[in-house]
Image (spheres, helix red, strand yellow):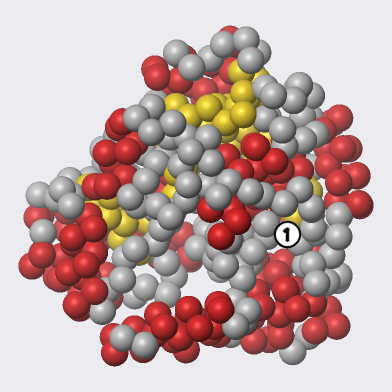
Amino acid sequence: MQSLKQLGLFWKWKTGEERQWLEETLVHWFDAPCSLFSSGREALLALLRNLPIDHGSEILIQGFTCVALPNAIHAAGFTPVFSEIDPATLNIDLEALEGKIHSRTKAIIVQHTFGIVADTEALRSICDKHGLLLIEDCAHVLPDVTGPKRIGKHADFLMLSFGRDKAASGISGGAIISKDEVVTNLLRTEVQNASELPFFTIKRLLLYPLVYASTKPLYGIGIGKALLLLASKCGALVPVISQKEKTGYQSTEIHRMPSALCALVRWEFKRFHSLNNHRRTLTKIYKDAAEHHNWNVPAGVDTHLPLQKFPLLVQDADDIRKKLKRYNAHLDDGWTGASVCPRSVSQEAAGYIPGSCPKAERLATQLLTLPTHPTISIKQAHQLIGILAKII
């Protein structure tokens, strides 16, 4: 296991050739300058506070997203404005978006929800029409040889995340790809002035795969989740979303991405095409099953896409998740139950006005996400389908 290998190389945790390798690889990949940070949310914060727009300006985002997005916008001194989503794609609805744009709007952040690629060409036209910046959130998808060519093509800036369940994982980490020379230079200064993550934090991050792998088999006897909770309480794990973040807070401190985490991303990139093909295979298996059982799937789901999760729409997703737990199938990944995810987030603190995006709110209660993670085998996917066929 790569995280175990990195734990033994503690003298290389902070700085080393892996950081330079990842930066050079992303520059080559996207043909634009790259800046690395310790998380996607820190990367987004660093970008936002160096944009040539006035404090208090509005940034449009979609009404079904992670709290990390509005938190970064608030921390940078801007106001997130939520716009309705398209039920066919779970991405921002272009017609609804036009009605949200006015003089204080300065940028749009487009999110490829679960890897369903948004129409960035149409968004580019909207941004050009109104003089807006376009920021592409690629946390859920990264292009490979056969991936959609429009990813990263039309935006002014790209935000990448290398979190635990992202398209390529380093447990944590993030990057900004900038096509603006002035902003690029400002981001380089941000990186130079950024702090290194403490050794203890890096150790906790590297421990996550080991702790998770050892507790997952114990979920079926009821103690796996308790052990994970205990490990978190003892400080052995870094939470994906902290309690403070759930109340709308994000620190303004910026950190560099540790070399140890860059090494994990490098390992993912070595087998990235096969990882994406695995996701495509599971996506096709789930979609074929959905067609066979007449399950409701968003129309934008394409079997050519390496989906980060496969979305099903059901009448009562919470009830189905509860029934699945009897079979030791745990599908509550946080992307359910609320417009700003996870559901334990204060919606008002995130800047979301309840009722402002009714389609997003409704779909959040209907969403059941099936795993396409590399650790999920084809056999396990078919087993999950068999269980769902009994329940739905």
Label 1: few (<14), some (14–19) or many (≥20) C-alpha neighbours in 10 Å:
many
Q: Is 99 in front, or is 29?
A: 99
**Picture quadrant where residue 262 is located:** bottom right
Please count the marks in the image.
1
Q: Which type of secondary structure does the marked residue at label 1 adopt? A: loop
Give percent across and percent down for residue 115: 44, 48
Residue 342 can be seen, yes or no: yes
Can you say whether 51 is above or below 386 in the image?
above
Q: Is 207 in front, or is 375?
A: 207
Q: On the rendered image, what quadrant is the C terminus found in?
A: bottom left
Give percent across and percent down for residue 183: 82, 33
Residue at 83 percent of width and 42 percent of height: 187
Q: Mark 1 points at which residue?
A: 38
Q: Which amino acid does label 1 sit on?
A: Ser
Q: On the rendered image, what quadrant is the N terminus found in?
A: bottom right
Residue at 40 percent of width and 80 percent of height: 225
**Picture quadrant where residue 243 is located:** bottom right
Relative to 23, is 270 on the left or the right?
left
**Picture quadrant where residue 353 is located:** top left
Residue 168 can be seen, yes or no: no
Residue at 37 percent of width and 46 percent of height: 338
Give percent across and percent down for residue 71: 61, 43
Residue at 15 percent of width and 48 percent of height: 315
Can you say whether 106 is above or below 71 in the image?
above
Can you say whether 8 is above or below 39 in the image?
below
Relative to 270, is 25 on the left or the right?
right
Can you say whether 106 is above or below 45 in the image?
above
